[in-house]
Image: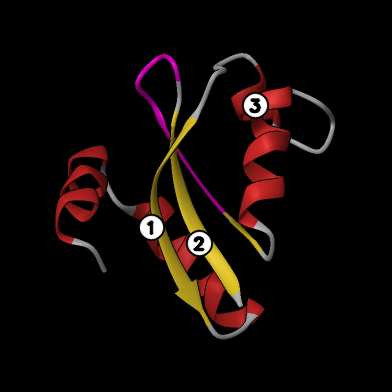
Amino acid sequence: MIYVYILECRDGTLYTGWTNDLGKRLKAHNAGTGAGAKYTRGRRPVKLVYTEILPDRSRALTREAQIKRLSKAKKLALLQTGP
């Protein structure tokens, strides 16, 4: 299983990514190590606010790109309503 996720950063911004190990990835984002995204390093702590499970990497990358193109208002609406 592959996950597409949205994190809420300390400054209120949203970060979208994908992973096959959600727990490990969340720890990496909050640790601020090289394994976490550069974007989230200065915005820790981050909290997981949304996930979708997808069957394969290809679909996850497509879905991640779709979500990243949404406005913040539409992302917030997605958090409330789900996929």
Look at the numbered disc 3 and give the secondary structure of its residue.
helix
For disc 1, the marked residue is 67
For disc 2, the marked residue is 4
Task: State left or right for residue 59 relative to residue 83.
Answer: right
Which is nearer the N-term, disc 1 or disc 2? Answer: 2
For disc 3, the marked residue is 30
Q: Amino acid at mark 1?
A: Ile
- The CA distance from mark 1 to mark 3 is 22 Å
Find residue 73 and report its image quarter: top left
Which of the image's four quarters has the C terminus?
Answer: bottom left
Q: At 60% across and 26% down in the image, what residue appears?
A: 40
Say if the magenta span includes residue 40.
Answer: no
Horizontal and vertical percent for residue 11? Answer: 40, 14
Horizontal and vertical percent for residue 77? Answer: 15, 49
Q: Nearer the viewer, residue 25 or 34?
A: 25
Say if the magenta span includes residue 16.
Answer: yes
Q: Is residue 61 above or below residue 68?
A: below
Q: Is residue 62 above or below residue 7?
A: below
Q: At 30% across and 52% down in the image, what residue appears?
A: 70
Horizontal and vertical percent for residue 41? Answer: 67, 21
Which of the image's four quarters has the N terminus?
Answer: bottom right
Q: Which residues are magenta?
A: 10-17
